[in-house]
Amino acid sequence: MRNFRELEVWKDARKLVKEVYILSKLLPESEKFGLISQINRCVVSIPANIAEGSAKYSQKDFVRFLQISLGSAYELESHLILCGDLEFVSNEKISEIIRKTQVLQKRIASLIKYNNSKH
């Protein structure tokens, strides 16, 4: 079992949650049950799955939850791109959060690769 609070990738995911929630407040009210809901759910899923996977005893189970977390990060990126396409928020704001999301994706993927190499 691991202490998820000590994982830098989990700490970075927490920071991303805050930034995305701030961004989602800028989206039109008409998207409350659409993109806003989708974006908030998938961004929260990233640190949540890292934490849940940390409670697993096997490397294989931990990696499976990291993969779910990574999938949520890619889902988030797709939703953010759509927000840009729909011109809901400035491309500058979207681009910065997409960049941070991509950095997090790489870090999660590296953690998956590292844990897969341990067995």
Image: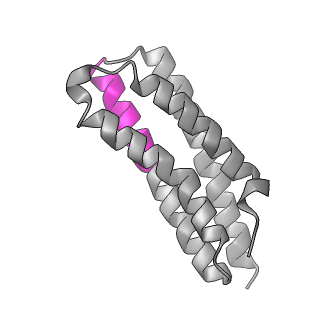
> Most prominent secondary structure in the magenta stretch?
helix
Residue extending farthest right: 6
Picture coordinates of residue 112 (x, y %)?
A: 64, 66
Left or right, 19 with respect to 27, comes to right
Residue sitting at x 70%, y 46%: 11
Question: On the image, which quarter does residue 85 sit in?
Answer: top left
Picture coordinates of residue 19 (x, y %)?
A: 55, 29
Picture coordinates of residue 95 (x, y %)?
A: 50, 24
Picture coordinates of residue 13 (x, y %)?
A: 62, 45
Above or below, 85 against 40 in this view is: above
Task: Count the marks.
Answer: 0
Image quarter where the C terminus lies is bottom right
Residue sitting at x 57%, y 41%: 102
Above or below, 116 against 97 in this view is: below
Q: Is 79 in front, or is 32?
A: 32
Q: How is the image coloured?
A: one colour
Left or right, 39 with respect to 95, comes to left
Indicate yes or no whether the magenta region holds residue 75.
yes
Question: On the image, which quarter does residue 51 sit in?
Answer: bottom right
Stretch in magenta: 74-87
Image quarter where the N terminus lies is bottom right
Residue sitting at x 23%, y 37%: 33
Above or below, 4 against 36 in this view is: below
Residue sitting at x 46%, y 57%: 71
Q: Is 76 in front, or is 113?
A: 76
Q: Is 73 in front, or is 51?
A: 51
Left or right, 104 with respect to 37, comes to right
